[in-house]
Amino acid sequence: MDFSSDNAWGVVPEIMAAIESANSGTAASYGNDAWTERLGKAFSDLFERDVAVFPVFTGTAANSIALACATAPWGAIYCHPESHIHIDECGAPEFYSGAKLLPIEGPAGKFSAASLEAAQINWGDRGVHSVRPMSVSITQATEAGTLYSLAEVEAISEVAKKYKLALHMDGARFANAVSALGCTPAELTWKRGVDLLSFGATKNGALAAEAIVVFTPRLVEGLEYRRKRAGHLSSKMRFVSAQLLAYLEDALWLRLAERANARAKRLAEGLQRLGVVPAYPVEANEIFVWLSMADMDALNAKGARLWPWTNVVQGGKVMTRMVTSFATPEKDIDAFLSELKKLAGK
Amino acid sequence: MDFSSDNAWGVVPEIMAAIESANSGTAASYGNDAWTERLGKAFSDLFERDVAVFPVFTGTAANSIALACATAPWGAIYCHPESHIHIDECGAPEFYSGAKLLPIEGPAGKFSAASLEAAQINWGDRGVHSVRPMSVSITQATEAGTLYSLAEVEAISEVAKKYKLALHMDGARFANAVSALGCTPAELTWKRGVDLLSFGATKNGALAAEAIVVFTPRLVEGLEYRRKRAGHLSSKMRFVSAQLLAYLEDALWLRLAERANARAKRLAEGLQRLGVVPAYPVEANEIFVWLSMADMDALNAKGARLWPWTNVVQGGKVMTRMVTSFATPEKDIDAFLSELKKLAGK
Amino acid sequence: MDFSSDNAWGVVPEIMAAIESANSGTAASYGNDAWTERLGKAFSDLFERDVAVFPVFTGTAANSIALACATAPWGAIYCHPESHIHIDECGAPEFYSGAKLLPIEGPAGKFSAASLEAAQINWGDRGVHSVRPMSVSITQATEAGTLYSLAEVEAISEVAKKYKLALHMDGARFANAVSALGCTPAELTWKRGVDLLSFGATKNGALAAEAIVVFTPRLVEGLEYRRKRAGHLSSKMRFVSAQLLAYLEDALWLRLAERANARAKRLAEGLQRLGVVPAYPVEANEIFVWLSMADMDALNAKGARLWPWTNVVQGGKVMTRMVTSFATPEKDIDAFLSELKKLAGK
Amino acid sequence: MDFSSDNAWGVVPEIMAAIESANSGTAASYGNDAWTERLGKAFSDLFERDVAVFPVFTGTAANSIALACATAPWGAIYCHPESHIHIDECGAPEFYSGAKLLPIEGPAGKFSAASLEAAQINWGDRGVHSVRPMSVSITQATEAGTLYSLAEVEAISEVAKKYKLALHMDGARFANAVSALGCTPAELTWKRGVDLLSFGATKNGALAAEAIVVFTPRLVEGLEYRRKRAGHLSSKMRFVSAQLLAYLEDALWLRLAERANARAKRLAEGLQRLGVVPAYPVEANEIFVWLSMADMDALNAKGARLWPWTNVVQGGKVMTRMVTSFATPEKDIDAFLSELKKLAGK
């Protein structure tokens, strides 16, 4: 009954097999190997156009390097106040870019195009006295487990273009988003004006592999230098690239995400039947619910791993996060719901 | 006949097995797992005292984070002009620390305690007009494939202590050094006054795993924050820690290094028999020799992977580097020597 | 009728005379001169205890260097969303410190001790995943022309101490605050737990001279190096120090501030008589009022220099800022009010 | 008998008068004043073409901001090992740019075009593993009191252009160089391929005023933001700009430098008559001589201010630096020589 994080789960067999398979003979180091060479085509196929792709070990590195390419040290990055880059990466985007993050409020982990425009009107033309907004980062799926619709991405993109802001998408759970929206990767990204994407694989079955995908060629400048000087150019890169190749092969990435999303749906529906209404729409693989500490403790005693997501207490309850993965067993969901039902005395 | 780099070789079976073995069930993310928990004891046993240990993905990250903990932004780091941190990490130590690197010359990849003292006399007391030296970094084994003797480390350490400089050891090839010197890890590090160690595993058979080992507790301050904001805190850390645990188990790390060193010796002796005298003493697993471009091309045509190590041409020859690993076959060495012999018309 | 800024006014005669007087013979450069030497005693006398004092050219430099001494790169600085360090210094505090600014809302340019505690409860214990709050910066007088009472400073200080946060005061208008509160400099700072002060002089009659005053000795570490590498150690420092000495002599600084505050009061009272109610309490030398663009244009046509302070429009009006200085003529105030009266058709 | 530094001398009357003259009425702050507006034309006239000019308070700021505009964080800056940016600014260029400084040796404070090319061949094409050289900084007059000839500047410039390196000139003593070379400012800078100039005034009679002059328009990008976030945008900028205007007016800057250079010549000739041969050619206003500590102490006892310039002792002597300024009295020179003569027992 581990719903603590998709990161709590290991590596899917297909990817583990790819790592093993790559472990044969010698290969040129630092990305000059055959696996890494194949990445360009694999990702260009996936996105239906030429893209530049750069593997790194973690999503924090992917986000930070991408944003640093899009934002000068005296620049600013718009983001949601609950975004990973703002509260969960210990200032990594600032460390890599030197820029400032400007949070834009909005419900359920999302901000609107109108809010972006309002923020820009406030920050955009102060001259040298303020940092100059240069990029926007949206998370898809969001940290609240919700989704930006294609139309919402497009609307944000239009404001970004209007003000010459680069548009970055934190796709740590990109697969869950694409699967849930039923669109193509292209439709969710460059066709909507996304300039850079952090393409996540680790949360969805890889060991440690993320890719920075750049759609707007001029933003590639310096990227490889930034990756190297951050220590994210793997000497045995073939093992990172092999993960990404296996992840894309036969749409494994989408099948895994589909499973994770289905599990979340099953869990959410069960919760609602028990009167536990998720705080946000359950659109990907994350569920946020309000529970009393007593219930949380009781569930943990039965084998769950829950904890308060924030320090906010409302009506005696705290919010907790539940995440499903490609490997979450249906029986764990059912067992959890059964325990919750007992608690509710129903 | 691939002598291009120890990084060109893959993952040893024991470490691959450990990765697979760790891939079972769920585990808390970001290092709160059972494998990472065991690292503390494993490394403390190895070093015969309590140490703090922090896994990261790459040697560049290990070096840079360690040095940033030991050196303020207005500080300076003494190092050899051919050290990895100075010329092969694209300014990563400067990026992480903000500090300046001050190279100290010396033959065969090493500088002496006397040269360190001379540098300090030059740089040490300029007040606020110059950066303030705060740390010293030595590489063991060096980038020239040589070793600092225990006495040499101690002499450097004494100068460092005299001037209150922290002593860092870049141990990307620490195993090769310990094996060659026939000392204990403790004798080569904290017993000689080393404050921080970048303990390498990747070049010697791991997939992507290095450890920052801190002997001087006050230098740990902020280290975990620095690692996180650099994107080097793995979400599925168990797979990094499992590599390190397997690497240490049953002295695997030393057995691998012993093999690599032995292969280098075999190659070096063969070269010398053919009149090709290494540029530096062959004390670990690297050999540097001067070859004509014609010979280099001919050998590459036969399956070698050689290239000029620097742009310097001397007497019509360029220097090339040959590295042996735990997996370099003896037959490759013999085949290479045989080709070289043919070239020499002997 | 220039109420655009206190910075629009020049240098008071006493300080200009001090600059001229310092221009005699040679003096050791970079702060090793007799004027700079006297600063320590002058400021220690002013604050009734030993303090460390470091002159710089600008308030941005003073704030940024002070905050960098109190906040690690992985740290965070609490501040008001309208504070100068957050919106008017182009990211200087982030540039100098590497840290993140966390704005805390509050009316009239101030946040409360309770809001600080709430922010800390939110941010304080997220482990390495978030930046670690390390300092608090309050502005006195605030950017809204209001004042923190001694009790309010003390309450904020208590929360800061509870959570081991350093307390910085941006005193760009420190003189106006001390004068208005009728307290001593000591009472407003270290006696209330302030650790570092940016002591402003430029806005109040100096040419270009601010002082970083440090009450908590451990925070001095590295300060002089930070100042030097930012280019804020004047080679002919005597001319900066001479300004500060003249500013303190015979309480010139307080007399100038008293005059500026009195002018603001006169202007505010006049405005209120005409039905123009300041948006915030007028407690120092700044007045914020809502005017229609038509009125603003008409007043500017008569010689005023007014412009919208933000892009917000409310009820057809925009906010404008009016600042009085030590040199603002009473006749300018009366003339301005007269014009405004004509506009109002009264 | 103060030959310690040109910074030891104060402000020339013409510049002090200009500061006083600017102290009248109100002026828009942060550089939007009439004085600053006139700078553009004044400098464009001086350089016989359109230039962009940005006043700052110090030479360290001028150098660092200029170099940051020309060099990415993963870039490198070639400079002389004794250059001010390398050893006398406490890492300011690295702080502002993030880049690495690569010193190029050469006698008498200068490096040659051939040495630059050799350095580039060594550093230029290492791919992402090394920082990428992006700029070259030469000092004119050098830190050794010598000059690059026009032909030498041109030769360096040609190598720079060949490798797409921006060329920066640290002109802290630009006036002394122009005066000594008898050329025009244009001939020494952009006509020889210089892209950015730190135009010094402080050492030559200003209070605190330097100008960044940019000849290559694309390098201006971000410059004003960098200046602001470093705290070098003066709120009362008119007083900085007024210094620069007065400095240029009626060729004051050249007349002052001519005087300083003539004084140095007088001193150097006197020294040589006494058998004290300067270590480097005396081509501007600095003289370096080897003296015994006993002689130095004796001269200091008579009112001189001499100290060892480095920690090097050669044949019982240390090197000391003597600098003349626009205000060094001839009688001080003669008195000093007279004391030295007595010491020599001649």
Image (cartoon, coloured by chain):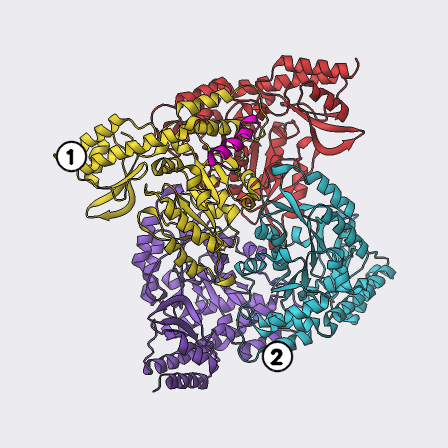
Chain colours: A purple, B cyan, C yellow, D red
Q: Could you tell me which quadrant the C terminus of chain C lies in?
A: top left
Chain containing mark 2: B
Give coordinates of residue A197: x percent, y percent.
45, 62
Left or right position of A328 against B174: left
Measured from the top left, where is residue B81 in percent x and y?
70, 48
* Quarter of the view holding residue D241: top left
**Is residue D250 in the magenta section?**
no
Say left or right for D191 vs A78: right
Q: Amino acid at mark 2?
A: Ser
Q: Position of residue D23 (x, y in %)?
A: 39, 24
* Residue for point 66% across, 70% down: B41
Check residue A240 in the rendering and tell me which mark sits there, or answer none. Answer: none
**Residue sitting at x 60%, y 21%:** D180
Q: Is residue D89 above or below residue D261?
A: below
Looking at the picture, which amino acid does disc 1 mark? Leu
Residue labelled with disc 1: C343
- The residue carrying pointer 2 sits among few (fewer than 14), some (14 to 19) or many (20 or more) residues within 10 Å by Cα, namely few
> Which SS type dominates the magenta stretch?
helix
Q: Is residue D156 visible?
A: yes
Task: State which region is magenta.
Answer: C33-48
